[in-house]
Image (cartoon, rainbow, N blue to C red):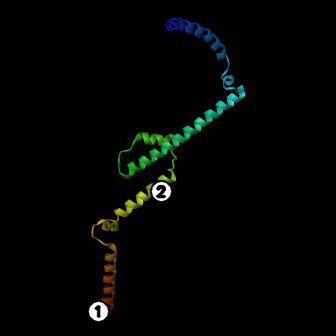
Amino acid sequence: MTFMLKTMVGSQLKNLTGSLRGGEDKEDGDKSAAEAQGMSQEEYEEYQKQLVEEKMERDIQFTQRKAERAMLRSHFRDKYRLPKNETDESQIQMAGGDVELHWELAKMIEEDTEEEEERASVLGQLANLPGLDLGSLKDKAQATLGNLKQSAEKCHIM
């Protein structure tokens, strides 16, 4: 029985007390944002300036990172002769056009380039052949060259 009474009267009581509290909230809303934060107006303005400056710094760093990634992607597009992407070019331009890769990324690209140049050379291609020992091939070539020099020295016509 008490349950039914609370249910019937309780919701009406909550509505009544809610409207009374609403009037009190309006008085709290008259306070400025600085007072709500527990700061003076000058402190609050300084705090807001710091927030804006920090956000600008984060945005600049984010733009720089995006430009570095775009630079890396455009490098690989050039390397593998893929079509250029205009969004990457625009990201590089947004960062000022003077974008340097992070030293670790630059080192990785340099190592990849060296490996590819080594593979592209004639000796690199020979090294990739199965069953070919470059050390023994070099020794045979030097021995043959030595034999030719000795036979040239013995020849009376030359």
State the residue position of label 1. 157
Numbered disc 1: secondary structure = loop
Q: Position of residue 16 (x, y in %)?
A: 58, 6
**From this viewpoint, which residue is outermost toward the left?**
131
Residue named by callout 2: 107
Q: Amino acid at mark 1?
A: Ile
Measured from the top left, where is residue 86 in percent x and y?
A: 41, 40
Q: Nearer the viewer, residue 108 or 120?
A: 108
Residue 40 left/right relative to 69: right
Most foreground residue, 151 or 7: 7
Q: How many marks?
A: 2
Q: Position of residue 39 (x, y in %)?
A: 70, 27
- In the drawing, does residue 109 fall left or right of residue 22? left
Q: Nearer the viewer, mark 1 or mark 2?
A: 2
Instruction: Give how far across and how far down residue 25 sits, in percent.
Output: 63, 14
Residue 70 in which image quadrant = top left
